[in-house]
Image: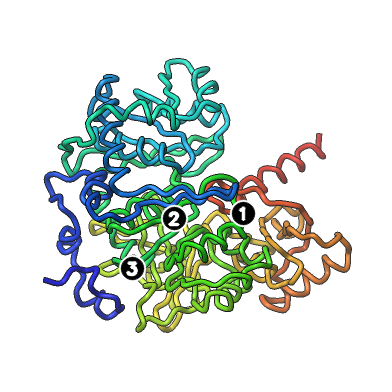
Amino acid sequence: MHLLTDYTTWTDAQQNFSSAKLWELFDGDREHLNIAHECVDRHAASGRDAVIVVHADGHDETITYRELSDDSSRFAHWLVAQGIQPGDRVAIMLEPSRAFYVAMFGAIKAGAIAVPMFTLFGPEAMRLRLNDCKPGLVVTNSEKAQTVRGIEGQKVTVFDDAALAALQGLAPSFDTRTRADSLAVFQYTSGTTRELPEAVKHSHRTLVTLMVAALYGTGLRPGDRFICPSSPAWGHGLWHGTFAPLAMGLTIGAWAGRFNAERLLQALSGHGFTNMSAAATHYRMMKNSGVGGNYKYVIEKLSFTGEPIDDETAGFVRSTFGLEVCSMYGTTEIGVVLVNYPGAADFPVKTGSLGKAVPGGEVQVQDDQGLPCAPGVNGNLMVRRRGEWIHTKDLARIDEDGYFYHAGRADDVIISAGWTMSAVELENAMLTHPDALEAAAIGVPDELRGQVVKAFVVTTRPASEDFVREIQDLVRGKLGQHEYPRLVEFVTELPKTPAGKVHRKVLREREAKAAAATTT
């Protein structure tokens, strides 16, 4: 019997994929399944390393499947002794480390709902999320524990190496008995502290549907050494970067601490990683580091998500790793729906494209009347689910070959004097300037045109009128005489969401606040 992991080509994916065959990759079935068992326990006897944590300070931490299986079982027993019941929430606010993985998989083994939380959350962001999910326990470090204790009603435990050592007398096995449709993880999407995003609630069987993205979005196959530097507090780092590859029994790499591009490049080379999935910002920072050519790599597959990659960064990836970087598009709510099939020799990757639909998926670009758009025409990116078309809140277009291209968020469209412009396309054009390290474009109010484009450019070059004209002329030449930033501001950094995306909403709010201040 052939498993889906045995096939590597695009043609095979179209001919052999079925939802039923996804279940063949797991021990569990449609009635009973546990994420921790699938990701950890069933690989404990393999002798393989499970996780290599690459720390920003220069040291690495290696955790074997056996160690993770035994210690997460001990933690599950400890949770039960603390009165944690199946269905209780356990919030985990730790950097990737032995303690983080033990706590997360231990909670899931015990039938509790793991709620990973970003370690850089401030007090207000913590309060909003904790008051929303109402955890029976918050597992964190000593630094964050003091802040959490100040939030009324929160029970806190500091989980570090000393606490882990204290568990060694507990049994190193735990009988998992969760149903496949029982809740396993609450995932908060990125958002501001003033605006609580709704938690996306995942059951254990989410792991099965996740494998569509793993097989065709990140191209995971047995034998890969896979690294994802995105935080496991977010969907990309947790589901695509942690659960999916561990479910295949792979050795994975994770990042802890403040991101450093050269340190990541060192880890790629030193640990012989063959497959990486990262945010577009990570690749851009690797390019900007200027040291990509200093190391040797054995990378075979590369993917990214979160936002489009500009042409200059795609060129850096091509010249440094000898590969096209493959887009993987989806949302926390609908999952991954467009991919570039990394590792498929018969699937040409087009620079800038989101690729094509996952096997069995239906995706269209539609106009406001719900009719399919012709190639080259921007429209609403729609996904068909349960007989209905769902709006992704993104804009896109297709080309003559059926490849999809991102045209920005629906709320990132800029309309100036009747012309519709894409923030993504404007930014991509600006980033071809050799002195533009990062760029963002938003629309700001204008009495004559309704809106005009304002650009924010990160650079080390001194600001000048000549520099502004260079940016404007460059964009005019690439997009059109009407399509350029009439206003340009040079900055040292851009606001980012915790997931690493440029936070255009923050820029719009700043501009609105500044405009209001000038009129009062």
What's the distance in space between the residues labelled 3 and 2, CA to CA?
A: 20 Å
What crowding class fits label 2: few (fewer than 14 Cα within 10 Å), some (14-19), or many (20 or more)?
Answer: many
The amino acid type found where label 1 is placed reads Asn
Question: Residue, x 44% and y 63% (percent of image)?
Answer: 380
Residue 216, numbered label: 3
Name the one closer to the observer, 105 or 313: 105
The amino acid type found where label 2 is placed reads Gly
Question: Residue, x 73% and y 59% (percent of image)?
Answer: 457
Q: Earlier in the sequence, mark 1 or mark 2?
A: 2
Residue that extends furthest to the right in the rendered view of this protein: 465
- In-image side of 117 versus 66 (left or right): right
Name the one closer to the observer, 57 or 288: 57
- In-image side of 134 versus 387 (left or right): right
Residue 213 percent coordinates (x, y): 33, 62
Residue 260, numbered label: 1
Label 2, on which residue?
Answer: 253
